[in-house]
Image (tube, rainbow, N blue to C red):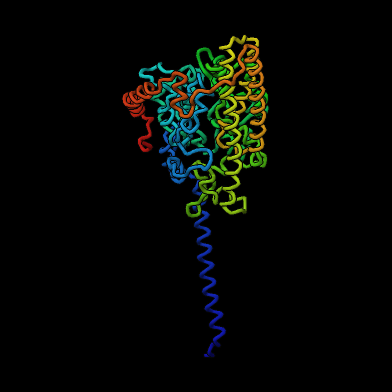
Amino acid sequence: MKKRPLPGWLVFAASLVVTFALGLLASSIMERRAEALQVNTPLAAIKPFESRNSAWGDAYPRQYGTLRDTRDMSFTPPVVGAHGLDALGENPRQVILWAGYAFAKDYNHPRGHAYAVEDVRNTLRTGAPMKLGEGPQPASCWVCKSPDVPRLMNELGIDEFYKRKWSDLGGEVTNHIGCADCHDPKTMKLSITRPHLAIGYKAATGRDISTASHQEMRTLACAQCHVEYYFDKTAVPGGQVVTLPWKHGFTVEAAEKYYDEAGFTDFVNPISKAPIIKAQHPDYELWQMGIHGQRGVSCADCHMPYTTDGSQKFSSHHVQSPLADPGKSCQVCHRQNAGELLRNVTERQTKIADMLARIEQQLVHAHFEAKAAWDAGATGDEMKPVLQLIRQSQWRWDFVAASHGASFHAPLECARILDDGLARAGEARLALARILARHGQLDPVALPDLSTKEKAQSHLGLDIASERAAKAEFIRTVVPQWLRQARENGTLDENAL
């Protein structure tokens, strides 16, 4: 038998190694493809209007695991405030601007979706109702807090839901923002579960929201709550219906025109007697006016970036600031290093925050100068145009302030709005100086001591200590009753407690 030369053996051995490696690679690819097909395959059935997030977690454990991470508040945004921080304590001027409204009592920086129900129970703004039907707020205040809301709207009917008080549904709304808010349980496709968005979207764009693309839905699902809205007391007798002021468009001026035509006012500031519109959180509106919105980048692209578990790629449901993990959010598109990107964001947000502070100071002066004018004998005819300027200025300030991410989403539009608001505050103060002079008051109007939240609230006559005591009793006695009711109904998510 002829002996094989050494090169031949080497070629033979190399062929075996290559063949083995290719076999491993093919096996791995097939295995990962099989895994990837499973990412949207439910591991358990989900019933219609299932509001318990852990029940969805049985079907989609990866996504549910990241949803639970919304309890993690370890990341502190550099400019817009630490999660849960007392915003009024940080900035007592807001107590004066919201005088006459529940926000003057209690307002904190937002926390993660996992705290949505807990935070609305705990805030002084919802009062301390000890019985069904008591309390200052309508059921509308639950609309953006829980997947129990679409379930209740289905069970009660939408009109009947809006006729209830907030306290009437405390034993029904116990699950924090989660899966059923945004997904169809049968197909897992993104779904609009709040009727106000579909109505507002049609009014603003002429389009049926069911025609929106998947990429559009990755923002519209968030817009169910992250929008400007008000409670319409005329649409349903005895009800307060969440309504979007989009008939004339998405800008601050378009919403203002809507409210003016409707003769709508959230509250009258008792210091100046100015009729005020309180902005909610017009994030969707302002996002559209920034470069990311104009380029079609969705909320989910940055706030719910794709992540992987093995070969399975899915959207993280740990909704949070993209700055918490710029590698998975910003740097998917941007080549700059994380430090530079962070500086870019911080610079924009700091400049807008400085403008907000300047307009706040002007508005605080305007409210007290208006009071001085009334005290000096100014007439309603004299004051009407001034109060309108204060309303317009504060609306512009609040439209930017209430949209926590706007200073990055649309810094140019924010600057335009605040510049306009600052000019209107200046016009109001100039007109007030003339009115005060006509009535013999030539000296500057002194401000009270507003150096702390407590001093500002005391100036308004608010008894916060009594309200906190009542709230503590409510949490001690009523909230356990609500949880017990939900447990008996089978709607309480025990795994989320």
Q: Position of residue 355 (x, y in %)?
A: 61, 34
Q: Nearer the viewer, residue 460 or 134?
A: 460
Residue 262 falls in which quadrant of the image?
A: top right
Vertical order, 437 against 419 (above or below): above
Q: In the picture provided, is 171 more to the left or to the right than 264?
A: left
Vertical order, 18 against 477 (above or below): below
Q: Position of residue 322 (x, y in %)?
A: 54, 44
Q: Residue at x 54, y 51 (%)?
A: 327
Q: Position of residue 271 (x, y in %)?
A: 53, 17
Residue 128 falls in which quadrant of the image?
A: top left
Q: Position of residue 373 (x, y in %)?
A: 59, 14
Query: As drawn, which residue projects farthest toward the bottom?
Result: 2
Mark count: 0
Q: Residue at x 46, y 29 (%)?
A: 452
Q: Residue at x 31, y 24 (%)?
A: 477
Vertical order, 66 against 438 (above or below): below
- Residue 275, visible in the rendered structure: yes
- Residue 214, visible in the rendered structure: no
Quarter of the image that includes the C terminus = top left
Q: Residue at x 65, y 25 (%)?
A: 426
Vertical order, 418 against 242 (above or below): below
